[in-house]
Image (spheres, grey):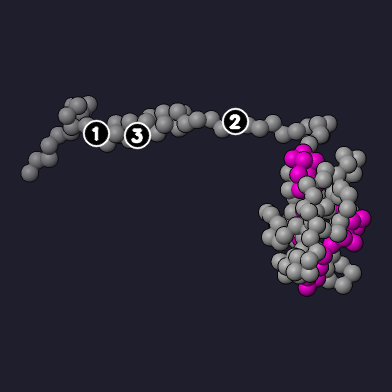
């Protein structure tokens, strides 16, 4: 049996189609990667630039300092109370905390809103904190015929926080 003689150069019909498909896939992949949106590079701040961070809520040390000055008006129930701190920007008592008393230590936890009724009797003058009492304390106050009209929330002086 005679082996067919190899013909050089091979004809176009005898060439493999595989390399052209590989090339086409590579070109399409490269075009796809090139068309992807570019991520913007954020410039790192230089050491001479200062970074400014604005806190949406006051630092815990602020509530600690205000509570140290005004905490004597707090109404405690099982060593727990709630207070609202005056927000100068919103001009309302909108920054709320739950305060836990454990011996001489106080622990502050921010809460979205007050869950107890606001104490509106026995306190006089504008304060940077709004205090609360329990429902039972409120009922007892009202049952004994003690009723004071609810004063409108007083705005603390701008100099104090």
Q: Earlier in the sequence, mark 2 or mark 1?
A: 1
Q: In front here: 36 or 84? A: 84
Label 2: which secondary element? loop
* Distance from the alpha carbon under mark 2 to that under mark 1: 41 Å
In front: mark 2 or mark 3? 2
Residue at image position (77%, 40%) is 91
| Figure quadrant of the C terminus | top right
Residue 146 is left or right of residue 16, and the answer is right
Q: Position of residue 95 (x, y in %)?
A: 75, 50
* Residue linked to disc 1: 17
| Circle 3 SS class | helix
Residue under label 2: 40
The stretch in magenta equals 66-93
- Label 2 to label 3: alpha-carbon separation: 28 Å
- Residue, disc 3: 25
Instruction: Give me the residue at 71% from left, 57% from top.
Output: 114
Where the N terminus falls, by quadrant?
A: top left
């Amino acid at each position: 049996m005679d082996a067919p003689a190899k013909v050089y150069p091979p004809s176009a019909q005898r060439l493999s189609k595989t390399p052209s498909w590989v090339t086409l896939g590579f070109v399409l992949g490269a075009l796809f990667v090139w068309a992807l949106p570019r991520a913007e590079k954020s410039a790192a701040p230089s050491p001479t630039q200062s970074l400014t961070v604005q806190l949406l809520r006051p630092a815990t040390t602020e509530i600690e300092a205000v509570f140290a000055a005004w905490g004597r008006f707090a109404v405690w129930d099982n060593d727990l109370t709630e207070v609202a701190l005056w927000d100068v920007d919103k001009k309302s008592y909108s920054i709320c905390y739950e305060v836990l008393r454990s011996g001489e230590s106080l622990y502050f936890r921010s809460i979205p809103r007050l869950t107890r009724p606001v104490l509106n009797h026995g306190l006089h003058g504008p304060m940077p904190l709004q205090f609360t009492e329990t429902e039972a304390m409120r009922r007892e106050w009202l049952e004994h015929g003690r009723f004071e009209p609810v004063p409108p929330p007083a705005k603390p002086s701008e100099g104090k926080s």
